[in-house]
Amino acid sequence: MTPIVEATGLRKRYGSVAALDGLDLAVEEGHVVGLLGPNGAGKTTALRILVGLVDADAGSVTIAGEPVSLTWVAGERVGAMVATPVFYPHLSGTENLRVLAAAWGWPRARSNARIAAALDLVDLAGASGRAAKGYSTGMRQRLGIALALLADPPILILDEPVNGLDPAGIVEIRDLLVALAGGGRTILISSHLLTEVEKTCDHVTIVDRGRIVAAGTPHSLAGGGERIELRVALDEIAAARRVLEAAGFRVTQQADPVELRVEGAPDGSTVGRLLAAAGCYPDELIRRRDSLEDVFLRVTGAQGDTRS
Amino acid sequence: MHLLAADRVRFGRRRDLWILVALVPVILAIMFVSEFNSATTPPPFFIFMDPPDPVAEAAMRAQMLDEWRLQLAAALPAFAFPASLIKVAGNVGPVILLAIYLATALVGGEFEWGTVRTVHLTSSRGRTLAVRVGVVVGLVGVVMGIALLFAAILPFLLSFEGAPLQRFAAPVPDFCFGMVTRLAALLPFIAVPVLMAVLARSTSFAFLLILLFFAADIAIAAAPFWSVSPMPWIPALTVSGSISRLIGAPDAPLALLVPAGVSMAALLAWAVLPVAAAIFRFRRLDLNE
């Protein structure tokens, strides 16, 4: 399938800092793709280039086959919210949306219908008449999403869409994105909230230092590292380890907490039976596999990283 | 038309703009009336005689008053219609300040709010900026239109020593050229601030650049060494120099040196080239706001 959003070899430097270092990205039609990365990884720069806000030093971008540049206009085809949501502070939520509708030359009836629908979708209808400068952080975020959704575009590009939202708001926006994706839209979301990406996206791309360091479905990325973790009494550890290694499993001992990590076992019950037969009875036996967070931290080396 | 409609929504609720647009013509009308009042109020004649001679003093006072009336008779036609239009169109200090404010606020504000991103995503950058410049020119035009309306009405309401002011009306030579020149003189004060707002990507820094630009412009135009240099016509190419050449006295040194057409061309270049440069730059800006 031909990608509807495609970036090839994107490079961008700000002075001595390489924001993007040969980033390739392909988003197929109808997919919801999450762009993950630590702060300063280049996510927002990539999105800015994707919608033509910023020119890449090298590389190319196409959206629906059209080359994107600084003179390219997204218009009604691509709804985008890049970096923080922006709006005219002296205008109400409705009027901020009306600016776009007017620029696109929509007739009054269509403007009114779409503005009401967009505000309703982000649960901002009740505050639509208030000046946007009085909105809370969460409301501003919702207004930004409403601006992106106004034209009901087939492609959505959203940068940290749930930033500043409370837990209920996060669930609402997540449900909204899932519903929009269900309607066949192509959605590209950048985020550092791993659980949100895991729950919303069918494809994840992890970016670090301006390059893609991992990509795949959340399941395929997180599915690796399947293992059994077990805790046994200290005096039984050596015996347990011998039994499991004799069965052909790879066993490593963790220091804190003291536990054995068993790789290669088909399931937990096999391990349990082997241990019981040897007279070892574990306190705890858990089957685990890498979470997206484990993968993220491993591929970005971002544990405790404060890059900005 | 769509972009114009979008700007109407954008700025329809900017109370600061509308207050200024309403206020400036009133200020111009007040300036016109107060200038007329100050011109038609007889100056105090201080006569000291030692020893005092009331008869001679009265005669001297009457003579001074006659001389003043004679001078006023030459000045009064400038307040009567249609010369009043030229007078108001020439008193444009407040309009220049308004033009600078509008151009900077309407262009620089987009960078400050970050809404320049919305502009980019919605429509062509170049067209949007061109329409925005048109909006500023239109607003300044409305202000000048209202001010000129006042200038057309007020002479019919004013009088001097019981005689209607219009009795002193006289035809104005080169009226159309005078009006066009004075209105065209406003354009650089829109064009340069638009360019500065795009370069500065803010309003406050843009104001600083504008201030520096016009200070440099005035300094260049007023520098004394041009008259003894091989290029004495240089001041006529600056904004302030070209305006002073076009609306100044016809026997001024610059007027004798440089044809009016050259200064008019310079003025129009200052009105067009900065806008063209602003559009060129805006179309190629990385929008990191």
Image (tube, rainbow, N blue to C red):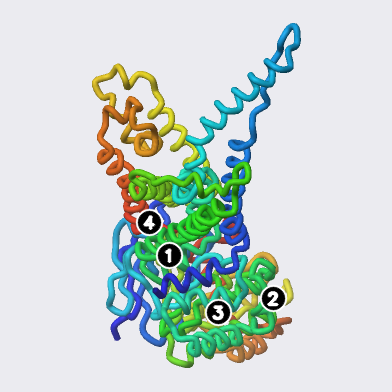
Task: Work out whether residue A196 or residue A171 is closer to the camera in this orientation and state it.
Answer: A171
The residue under the point 51% across, 44% down is B79
Residue at the disc numbered 4: B282
Q: Secondary structure at mark 1?
A: helix
| Apparent side of residue B235 relative to residue B87 in the rendered image (left or right) | left
Q: Secondary structure at mark 3?
A: helix
Q: Is residue B165 above or below residue A214?
A: above
Q: Residue furthest front?
A: B55
Q: CA distance from mark 4 to mark 2?
A: 37 Å
Query: Which chain is disc 4 placed on?
Result: B
Residue at the disc numbered 3: A146
Q: Is residue B285 above or below residue A46?
A: above
Residue at the disc numbered 2: A166
Q: Nearer the viewer, mark 3 or mark 2?
A: 3
Co-location on one chain, circles 4 and 3: no
How packed mark 3 is, by other alpha carbons closer than 10 Å (few <14, some 14-19, many 20 or more), is: many
Please report whichever mark, 1 or 3, sits nearer to the chain's N-terminal start: 1
| Apparent side of residue A306 relative to residue B56 in the rendered image (left or right) | left
Q: CA distance from mark 4 to mark 3?
A: 27 Å
Q: Secondary structure at mark 2?
A: loop
Circle 3: residue type = Ala
Please report whichever mark, 1 or 2, sits nearer to the chain's N-terminal start: 1
Residue at the disc numbered 1: A48
Circle 1: residue type = Arg
Q: Residue furthest top?
A: B51
Circle 2: residue type = Asp
The residue under the point 43% across, 48% down is B186
Co-location on one chain, circles 1 and 2: yes
Residue B8, how many percent across, how many down? 50, 70
Q: CA distance from mark 1 to mark 3?
A: 19 Å
